[in-house]
Image: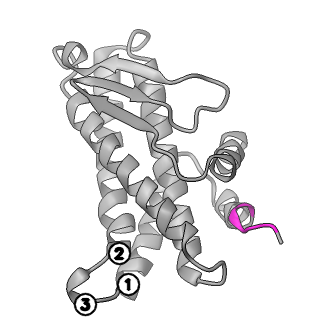
Amino acid sequence: MESLKSIVGWIRAHRCERLVKYQAWKLQISGASVGAGPVKADVAKVSTRLEEIVPASMLATALDDSQYLLCTTAASMANSNPMKDDIQNARVAIILGITQLRVLVASLDRRTVKELRKELKRWIIYMNRLLKDVVRPFVYRPHAGIPRYRIASIQRGRKSLRQIMRYQGVKEQWLKELEQWLKPSS
């Protein structure tokens, strides 16, 4: 729970910021680095023994783009907009996911390839689901002229978000507290 509180504190302090850099096969993940610096990896070198690092790196970049856009969207919304809570919860899950990958990359030299492969595959499955079920409902549909939020998709996304956050080790009571922590102070 302390790491979740730290991430919420980080969100409040840093506003909209990118957490992942991926250029020329070099990956740098800052995540919500609570007390630690960024983690770097040479994806080309690591991928010779752990090919899952390539899609994980690309997915981390997509997640980071999404959390940044969600952040700028939430910042422009009124606090009374009910969609703002959903967007902030999705952003917390994304940042937790990026932080999880940061921990996995930091442990490259201390864990077996088999163990890392299994964890990265699981991470990829859950984070793809996060993008598909939780982030996609908030995507702007330009042909409609105004943003259109699909209520059924958002409700399905809420259910998926709870499942994903359970995978991330977040307990149900923490999710309720999370919504209170993210509320702007009056």
Residue range in magenta is 181-185
Quarter of the image with the N terminus in it: top right
Q: Is residue 8 magenta?
A: no
Q: Is residue 184 magenta?
A: yes
Give the number of the disc on residue 137: 2
Q: Position of residue 63 (x, y in %)?
A: 36, 49
Choose the circle earlier in sequence order: 1 or 2.
Answer: 2
Q: Is residue 151 left or right of residue 71?
A: left
Q: Secondary structure at mark 1?
A: loop
Q: CA distance from mark 1 to mark 2?
A: 6 Å
Would you call the spot at circle 3 few (<14 residues within 10 Å), some (14-19), or many (20 or more)?
Answer: few
Question: Count of labels shown?
Answer: 3
What residue is shown with label 3?
Answer: 144
Q: Position of residue 64 (x, y in %)?
A: 39, 47
Q: Amino acid at mark 2?
A: Pro
Residue at position x 34%, y 24% from top? 116
Answer with the quarter of the image where residue 180 lies: bottom right
Q: Are marks 1 and 2 in contact (CB under 8 Å)?
A: yes
Q: How is the image coloured?
A: one colour
Residue at position x 64%, y 45% from top? 7
Q: Amino acid at mark 3?
A: Ala
Position of 138 relative to 122 (above/below): below
Would you call the spot at circle 1 few (<14 residues within 10 Å), some (14-19), or many (20 or more)?
Answer: some
Q: Secondary structure at mark 3?
A: helix
Answer with the quarter of the image where residue 67 lies: bottom left
What residue is shown with label 1?
Answer: 149
Tell which of 16 and 139 is nearer to you. Answer: 16
Q: Are marks 1 and 3 in contact (CB under 8 Å)?
A: no
Q: Nearer the viewer, mark 3 or mark 2?
A: 3
Q: Position of residue 38 (x, y in %)?
A: 50, 24
Q: CA distance from mark 1 to mark 3?
A: 11 Å
